[in-house]
Image (tube, rainbow, N blue to C red):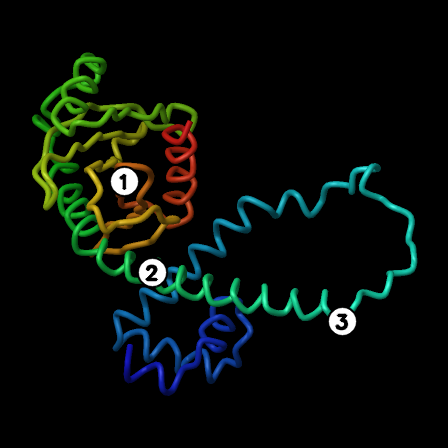
């Protein structure tokens, strides 16, 4: 993104994501995105964050303020000078820490594309069209499947129940990865369209991350690191539907 960053500021990136650019400038940003995969990935990252924030908190905006929080107004006491100075220093250190955190998250994002998102999307593209042998172990042996894959990965894993979202478990298989064995769980809806959840052990330099979005040909994926494991949900579905399922999977696996 070195060439693009000189012509597109971070303020403009956020304005693009929030739909606040002029049509001319928006067209320019999209032209640069087509030329610069890193710029495109950065913008998609912020778009995903926006999607998650709206999904999580839009409903809260309509809720009434609890009565116990409706405090009577009082004049604000004048704070001493030392308090304001201390607060400013605290904000300075907080801002510096946040900057390092964001940069670290972005680096983890770009490393994980090659080591996590792309292999999972490729495995989805290979096995999801299979008619006779889409999985090694079927859903009728779910407990055996989970125990077997957990043993091979050396970590306890689970197959989320996606029935409420219209997906049933087909089964799963063992796969290789750049960090030892990986697991793939396959789901399908009533039309036979399939979605896969890829799981592998995280690398030592990978940190817990929020959802990241990756698109590879016709396959959309959301991937994240949680605890000792990396997860990728892949499917040929619209981005919003994939995000809804990814949120459900995350909720089930985090508790």
Whole-number angstrom distance, CA of label 3 to CA of label 1: 49 Å
Whole-number angstrom distance, CA of label 2 to CA of label 1: 19 Å
Which mark, residue 99? none
Mark 3 lies on a secondary structure that is helix
Mark 2 lies on a secondary structure that is helix
Label 2 or label 3, whichever comes before in sequence order: 3
Kindly indicate the quadrant of the structure image that contains residue 108: bottom left
Q: Is residue 102 left or right of residue 191?
A: right
Q: Residue 189: x percent and y percent?
A: 31, 30
Which mark, residue 81? 3
Q: Residues within 10 Å of mark 2 (few under 14, many from 20)?
A: some
Label 2 or label 1, whichever comes before in sequence order: 2
For disc 1, the marked residue is: 231
Mark 1 lies on a secondary structure that is strand
Above or below, comparing residue 72 to residue 231 in the picture = below
Q: Is residue 240 left or right of residue 226?
A: right
For disc 2, the marked residue is: 104
Q: Residue 223: x percent and y percent?
A: 30, 46
Kindly indicate the quadrant of the structure image that contains residue 159: top left
């Amino acid at each position: 993104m070195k060439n693009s960053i000189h012509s597109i500021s971070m303020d403009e990136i956020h304005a693009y994501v929030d739909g606040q650019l002029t049509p001319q400038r928006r067209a320019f940003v999209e032209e640069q995105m087509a030329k610069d995969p890193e710029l495109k990935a950065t913008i998609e990252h912020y778009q995903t964050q926006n999607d998650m924030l709206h999904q999580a908190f839009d409903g809260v905006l309509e809720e009434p303020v609890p009565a116990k929080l409706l405090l009577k107004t009082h004049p604000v006491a004048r704070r001493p000078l030392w308090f304001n100075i201390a607060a400013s220093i605290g904000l300075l250190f907080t801002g510096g820490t946040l900057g390092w955190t964001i940069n670290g998250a972005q680096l983890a994002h770009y490393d994980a594309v090659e080591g996590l998102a792309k292999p999972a999307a490729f495995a989805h593209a290979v096995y999801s069209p299979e008619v006779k042998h889409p999985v090694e172990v079927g859903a009728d042996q779910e407990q055996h499947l989970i125990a077997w894959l957990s043993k091979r990965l050396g970590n306890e894993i689970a197959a989320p129940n996606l029935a409420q979202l219209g997906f049933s478990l087909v089964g799963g298989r063992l796969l290789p990865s750049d960090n030892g064995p990986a697991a793939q769980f396959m789901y399908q809806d009533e039309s036979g369209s399939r979605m896969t959840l890829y799981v592998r052990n995280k690398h030592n330099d990978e940190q817990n991350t929020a959802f990241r979005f990756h698109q590879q040909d016709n396959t959309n994926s959301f991937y994240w690191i949680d605890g000792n494991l990396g997860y990728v949900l892949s499917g040929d579905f619209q981005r919003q539907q994939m995000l809804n399922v990814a949120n459900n999977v995350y909720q089930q696996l985090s508790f």
